[in-house]
Image (cartoon, rainbow, N blue to C red):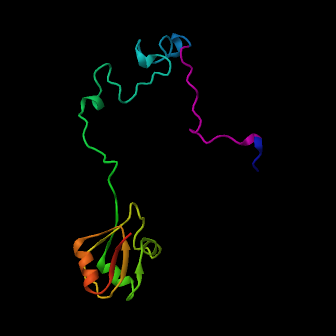
Amino acid sequence: MITIDSLRPTPGSNKKYKRLGRGQGSGKGETSGKGFKGQKSRGTGKVHLWMEGGQTPLHRRLPKFGFKNFTKKVYAIVNLETLDKVFDSNDEVTPEILLEKGIISKVYDGVKVLARGEITKPLVVKAQKFSKTAKEKIEKIGGKAEVS
């Protein structure tokens, strides 16, 4: 039967605490196993990864590059072949409906319709941008391409 006083930790799970700086006889006296002087022997002794001992650090030696255009517009892209598969004749296509049907995942700055594939049904497509060819294909079949 197991009683509370017979419980013991699993052998090897508990380590004995090392008593540092308690005399030469302990084997860890004087400098407590930290060697002599210097940053790593004092206090917390942390040296950051980017520290290079006074030398100009790598991240400052490497050149800066690149440019982020903060005025760039990002459009969700839809092709005519997709519209032809999903919509019926004379349907109205808007960014909200495209989101609802899962054709686009996010509107960003608007929707741009591109001309990949063929369109066989007249549709009323409302988007922020159209490629020249896409607009021609939509209007040729009898649909409307409206910029909203």
- The spot of residue 108 in percent (x, y) is 40, 61
Dominant secondary structure of the magenta stretch? loop
Residues drawn in magenta: 5-21
Residue 92 among magenta residues: no
- The spot of residue 119 in percent (x, y) is 28, 84
Image point 29% across, 80% down: which residue?
81
Residue 7 among magenta residues: yes
Relative to residue 123, is residue 61 drawn left or right?
A: left
Relative to residue 114, is residue 3 drawn left or right?
A: right
Dividing the picture into quadrants, the one containing residue 147 is bottom left
- The spot of residue 40 in percent (x, y) is 42, 19
Looking at the image, which is closer to me, 8 or 1?
8
- The spot of residue 141 in percent (x, y) is 27, 87
Relative to residue 9, is residue 85 drawn left or right?
A: left
Looking at the image, which is closer to me, 44 or 61?
61
Image point 58% across, 39% down: which residue?
13
Looking at the image, which is closer to me, 46 or 1?
46
